[in-house]
Image (spheres, rainbow, N blue to C red):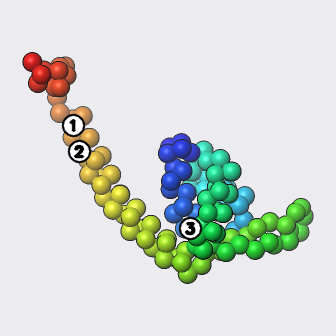
Amino acid sequence: MHGRELRNLLHPFLLLLIFERPGHGYDLIERLEAMGVSDVEPGQVYRVLRGLERDRSLLSMWEAAAAGPARRRYELTAKGRNDLRSWIARLAQLNHIMDAYLRRSADAFARPRDGRDSYATSRG
């Protein structure tokens, strides 16, 4: 999947990653890539992180690095944990719908076709 297709899923992905282990932006981008979300622009990730922080789902604090500049470290709040639970329920429902869709499409492709477009033939 491409970054544009996954853009709306950055919220739950980032909430889960931060729930697993707080981190800074670059770390989170690397962890997204490890999840298979590799075509996302860093600017989009940082916009989502700022939005989650404005929404009070995340807290951030500056952390001094051993080498290089300080980095902003993100942690989940109680609201963020509740948001994550809500996303999990919504994504489970979407997963159920997508499973039904994939089964139906597999069945449709498995049926023999006579080579005619069913829409065109139904219009006479």
According to the picture, the residue beneath numbered tag 2 turns out to be 104
According to the picture, the residue beneath numbered tag 3 turns out to be 15
Q: Give the secondary structure at mark 3.
A: helix
Residue 14 position within the rendered picture, expressed as x and y whole percent measured from the top left: 58, 63
Q: Closer to the N terminus: mark 1 or mark 3?
A: 3
Look at the image and tell me whether residue 79 can be seen. Answer: yes
Q: Quick check: 82 left or right of 54?
A: left
Question: Which is closer to the viewer, label 3 or label 2?
Answer: 3
Q: Is residue 52 above or below residue 7?
A: below
Q: Closer to the N terminus: mark 3 or mark 2?
A: 3
> Residue 55 lies in what quarter of the image?
bottom right
Q: Give the secondary structure at mark 2.
A: helix
Q: Residue furthest front?
A: 54
Nearer the observer, 100 or 58: 58
Q: Give the secondary structure at mark 1.
A: helix
Look at the image and tell me whether residue 22 can be seen. Answer: no
Residue 85 position within the rendered picture, expressed as x and y whole percent measured from the top left: 45, 73
Q: Residues within 10 Å of mark 2 (few under 14, many from 20)?
A: few
* C-alpha distance separating marks 3 and 2: 32 Å
Task: Identify the image quadrant of the C terminus.
Answer: top left
According to the picture, the residue beneath numbered tag 1 turns out to be 108
Q: Are marks 2 and 1 in contact (CB under 8 Å)?
A: yes
* C-alpha distance separating marks 1 and 3: 37 Å
What amino acid type should be assigned to the residue bearing mark 2?
Arg
Residue 18 position within the rendered picture, expressed as x and y whole percent measured from the top left: 61, 70
Nearer the observer, 96 or 77: 77
* Residue at position x 49%, y 45% in the image: 5
What amino acid type should be assigned to the residue bearing mark 3?
Leu
Residue 71 position within the rendered picture, expressed as x and y whole percent measured from the top left: 80, 66
